[in-house]
Amino acid sequence: MTAPAPSQSFVIALLTATALHLLVMITVRLAPPARPIPPEAALEVVLLAAPPPAPAVAVTPSVLAAHTQTGTAPAPPVIVKPPPPAPAASRAPPAPAPRITPAPRPAPPAPPPLAVIAPPEPEPDPLALPTAPALTAAQILASQDVALEQFNRAQDTQLREQARRVRRHAISASTREFRYANYLGAWARKVERIGNLNYPPIAKEQHLSGNLILHVAIRADGSVDTISVVRSSGVPLLDQAARDIVKLAAPYAAFPPDIAAETDVIDIIRTWQFRRGGVLGWEASAPP
């Protein structure tokens, strides 16, 4: 047997070393170098409240990491194959699920009856004013009639008492006392002037004429108290014209001091003459 050539021996030795090297690499797990332990130092520890652990969920990664957090290679995943399904003939039908009938809910207890407590009656207020009872319409009308009648009676009584207290003096064309005759003459001149200026136009157009007796009451300040027709002229237009002329001429002169000292109201009674020529006149004064 011949010895191999030197080149062949080298090739065989190289192949043998390569195979051994590969076998060692496959069978031997290389561990990473140990990390150096740092020297002891003061550490600041902060305690945090850890959240509640989440339920574990099995996660099957599709790609495995090269190294775990500890630096070691992860273990290969274990694949569990489900058992093959049994033949259809040998499978038994699943048992029906038991039907659970819910228990009836108990009726809620009836609430206890509420006790009705009447509020205490308020004590009467000694300062409160008494309230009047409600009145019907008939009672209201009757009370108004009674109140109106009482008012009229009171007014009549007051006027009568006032008439007794009021000092009155009547004057006319026949008055001879100088102070009253003088006041009557001034009053008549003013009324005649105003009457001729405001003579009723209809009386002029229709040539109406007539005589009437008019009563005029004058107060001490010259204002008119009352106006009344004692005897009508027979023509309502002339009667109303006499009233209007008295109102237009007011107010009149106040009473002189000697008359005001003894008289509160002067009653002037004069005969008014509406003549055909549209002129207002008076009755002739009686001779002295």
Image (cartoon, helix red, strand yellow):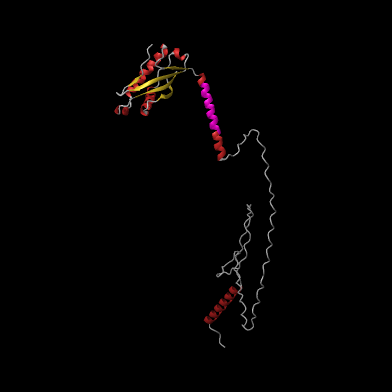
Q: In the figure, 171 relative to 136: above or below?
A: above
Of 174 and 71, nearer the camera is: 174
Q: In the figure, 69 relative to 234: above or below?
A: below
Q: Residue furthest bottom?
A: 1
- Write the start and end of the magenta stretch as one range: 146-162
Q: Quadrant of residue 259?
A: top left
Question: Is 265 situated left or right of 136 in this image?
Answer: left
Whether residue 150 appears in magenta in the rendering, the answer is yes
Q: Residue 132 placed where, x, y %? A: 60, 36
**Is residue 12 among what the camera can see?**
yes
Of 264 and 281, nearer the camera is: 281
* Quarter of the figure that contains the C terminus: top left
Residue at horizontal 56%, vertical 39%?
A: 138
Q: Residue 218 placed where, x, y %? A: 43, 20
Q: Residue 54 placed where, x, y %? A: 62, 62
Of 49 and 182, nearer the camera is: 182
Q: Quadrant of residue 90?
A: bottom right
Residue at horizontal 45%, vertical 12%?
A: 258
